[in-house]
Amino acid sequence: MSGSSDTAPRLADRRFVLATDLDGTFLGGNEKERAELYDWIEENRLSVGLIFVTGRDPEFIEDLCAGGVPWPEYVIGDVGTTIAEVSPDEGIKPIIELEREIADLWNGSGDRVRKTLRDHPGLSLQPTNFRYRVSYDLDMPEYDNRAGALIAELGLDHIISDSRFFDVLPQGISKGPSLKKLVAHLEIDERKVLAAGDTLNDLSMLACGLPAVAVGGAEQALLKEIADLDHVYKAEAIGAAGILEAVAALGMHSTPKG
């Protein structure tokens, strides 16, 4: 396992840190484009740091990276409810001090959420036991939008993304706040971080003030929300190629194309 190591510089001392969503972003584009990005990262590990910011869980990430995708140094998973370090010996290990507020805000709400939304039109519970979130597959034509109000009455937040997913989260917790918390904890200069995403559940990290890119092929609902955000680069290239396009256009690091 690569990622964090005793010999690599800490992320605060690297020239550039990529904080990227997975599906449609880091994993988006064709095989050649993904290989170009991944090879570039591996060839520049001393100056490039990698953080995954995803709705996926640690088990998925471990399987993904075991299959040849570059290991990140840190993971913000489960739509911002997991904040973890990648340890060569222990795998993806939650950073307890950064997750404490998340756990307190969630306050064991899983059963309450599942009871409240049981048989709710358009929502199908995902069979995964997340720690601080409950997630549903969304059938938009059948969906009754009163679900949002029901979740708010529980003192929780919800996010709809890609018109396919409905996530229930602790109030105020999402990808953006968790990324900012991790960046501050690691003492990384925010100007060196590029947040990359493509759907509405990436909105909070693209809008949080860090340099950001919405990759080509991004969800139209996301593009509408970020249209007036000057700090968000709107890439033309799809997925992985869009990330490298933004790195070059923003002058954050040398890339294979300049």
Image: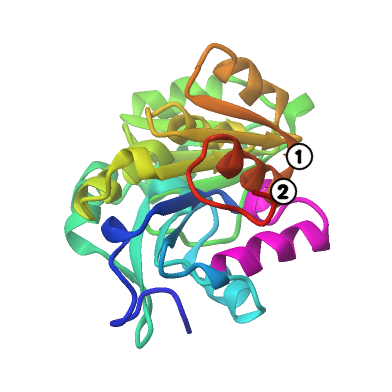
Q: CA distance from mark 1 to mark 2?
A: 5 Å
Left or right, 172 with respect to 244, comes to left
Relative to 200, residue 24 above or below: below
Q: Amino acid at mark 1?
A: Ala
What span is colored magenta in the figure? 23-41
The x and y percentages for residue 172 are 32, 32
Residue 81 location in percent, x, y?
37, 50
Image coordinates for residue 42, horizontal then vertical, percent: 56, 72
Query: Residue placed at 34% from the left, 80% from the top?
Result: 5
Camera-nearest residue between 151 and 88: 88
Residue 170 is inside the magenta segment: no
Give the residue displayed 66% in from the left and 79% down from the top. 67
Q: Which residue is mark 1?
A: 237
The relative height of residue 138 versus residue 88 in the rendered view (above or below) is above
Where's residue 16, x and y in %? 42, 52
- The way the protein has been coloured in the rendering is rainbow
Q: Is 146 on the left or on the right of 170, as rendered? A: right
Q: Secondary structure at mark 2?
A: helix
Whether tag 1 and tag 2 are in contact, CB under 8 A, the answer is: yes
**24 magenta-colored:** yes
Give the main secondary structure, helix, strand or loop, of the magenta stretch: helix
Q: In this rendering, would 18 be left or right of 38? A: left
Q: Residue at x 48, y 32 (%)?
A: 206
Q: Residue furthest bottom?
A: 89
As drawn, the label of residue 241 is: 2
Q: Tell me if mark 2 has few (under 14), some (14-19) or many (20+) residues whose alpha carbon lies within 10 angstroms of its own.
A: many
Mark count: 2
- In the drawing, what numbered circle is on residue 164? none
Q: What kind of residue is marked 2?
A: Ala
